[in-house]
Image: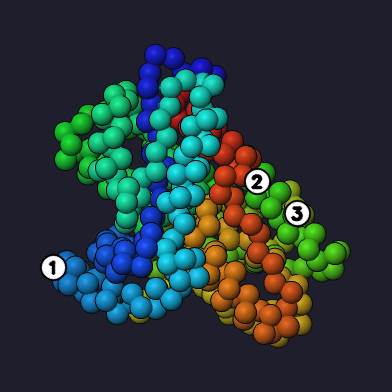
Amino acid sequence: MKIRNQKTGVLLLNLGGPEKTEDIRPFLFNLFSDRSIIRLGPCFLQKPIAWWIAKKRAPKSAASYAHMGGGSPIRRITDQQASALETQLGAHGSFLVRSCMRYWHPYAMETLQELRDEGVDKIIALPLYPHYSVATTGSSLADVRDCLNRLSWSVPLHVIRQWPDQTAYIDSLVTKIRQGVKHFNGEPVQILYSAHSLPVRFIEEGDPYVDHLQITIKALEKQTERKGILCYQSRSGPVEWLGPSTKETLENLARKNMKNVLVVPISFVSDHVETLVELDIEYRELAEGLGMHFVTTSGLNTDPQFITALKKLVLSAAA
């Protein structure tokens, strides 16, 4: 399909992350200042409490980021995904694909100003979250719309809200799972689908995140013919979070004498602290201490099958 006579800007919406140690505290402040993720007391206290939490958490977070050279690779990987996607889209028209982060550079305002200067005719917002949540996609889209209003720019905005069973995306995950299973040489293996947790309150208020995760898992199980267990990682704060946790699930499997575990970080499409540190280091140490053979599937990142999934999403929205 060829999209003619239009220049289309594509926003790859992502969380963002600190690129060096001194970025960690202001990044955390930005994160905890967002009431769509966590409500810290009455509205007027949100930022003061966020400042206090960021100050308290920064040293612990710095220790995690130290495993990755002091900062997150998420901007570098998202930029690489944007470049690969722009290359694939080149045969179909004029597309400019850019990273657009929620809590660190490049912020939506920076990216939108660049696209306006480039003279794009319309914008497609593609969240790098296959499973919709108000805390991720919802927050990013609200930020984009707010920035467009502040810029007084009435460019058409086309939104891709979720894509939990997009065919090429599922195929790319199936490939990773089949590669991962080979590490166990035909022995029985339990698949764990580890997703970023959310406060239970979000689901009670109608957030479709868990339903979307189940859609993805059902599609994967149909192709792999292997049943998996859904669990959750990356909790923070004194609220009730979705469970069971990945830690609890590993401990339960160890009590049942399960020796082989393949972890699929199902809600992450690029490597960052949750996959490279929390899963690959912290949970690996836990599992191996429990006598398990622990393997995680490699990140989708710029895998050609995954970039093809993004291309198909964009072309469908562009049409």
Residue 175 vs 18, above or below: the answer is: above
Mark 3 → mark 2, Cα distance in angstroms:
10 Å
Image x and y of residue 23, in percent:
31, 64
Secondary element type, mark 3: helix
Image x and y of residue 170, in percent:
63, 46
Q: Residues within 10 Å of mark 2 (few under 14, many from 20)?
A: some
Quarter of the image for residue 194 reads bottom right
Query: Is residue 251 left or right of 93 when viewed as pictured?
Result: right
Residue assigned mark 2: 172
Q: Using the rendered image of the protein, determine whether residue 18 is visible from the camera's viewpoint.
A: yes
Q: Quadrant of the N terminus?
A: top right
- Residue at image position (23%, 77%) is 52
Amino acid type of the residue that numbered disc 3 sits on in the rendered structure: Arg
Residue assigned mark 1: 44
Q: Which mark is residue 178?
A: 3
Q: Mark 1 vs mark 2: which is more N-terminal?
A: 1
Secondary element type, mark 1: helix
